[in-house]
Image (cartoon, grey):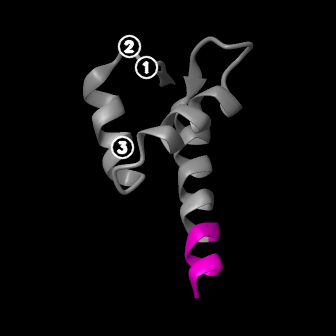
Amino acid sequence: MLVTMQNSALVSKLVALADGDIDLVQRAIRATSDKGGAADLEKVVQFIVEARKARVKAVA
């Protein structure tokens, strides 16, 4: 499934996964998109999960 910021229902779920961090969701979509277009959902989720893990390690 492809992700863009235009799919508000999916973006809302990704924001929840990102602990309310819309900036993280936007970074994930930009980082995994094909030349600024849509991004693969699996890659976006992986990016968010890895960023959350890194944040937890930095705090610990």
Q: Report helix, strand or loop for mark 1.
A: loop
Q: Earlier in the sequence, mark 3 or mark 1?
A: 1
In the depicted structure, whether residue 22 falls above or below residue 7: below
Q: Is residue 46 left or right of residue 5?
A: right
Label 3 vs 2, first from the N-terminus: 2
Q: Position of residue 9 (x, y in %)?
A: 25, 27
Asked if residue 17 is among those painted magenta in the image, a careful observer would answer no
Q: Quadrant of residue 49?
A: bottom right
Look at the picture and state if 33 lies above or below 22: above
Q: CA distance from mark 3 to mark 1?
A: 11 Å
Name the residue at 42% across, 48% down.
21
Q: Which residues are magenta?
A: 54-60
Task: Name above or below for residue 51 compared with residue 8.
Answer: below
Which label number is shown at residue 5? 1
Measure the alpha-carbon separation of dots 2 and 1.
Answer: 4 Å
> What residue does disc 2 label?
6
Q: What residue is drawn where x is 29% and y is 22%?
A: 8
Answer whether labels 2 and 1 touch (C-beta < 8 Å): yes
Give the numbered dot on residue 52. none
In the image, what residue type sits under mark 2? Gln
Q: Could you tell me which secondary element the residue under label 2 belongs to? A: loop
> How far across and how far down the image is residue 38, in percent?
57, 16
Q: Main secondary structure of the magenta part?
A: helix
Q: What crowding class fits label 3: few (fewer than 14 Cα within 10 Å), some (14-19), or many (20 or more)?
A: some
Numbered circle sitting on residue 15: 3
Q: Amino acid at mark 1?
A: Met
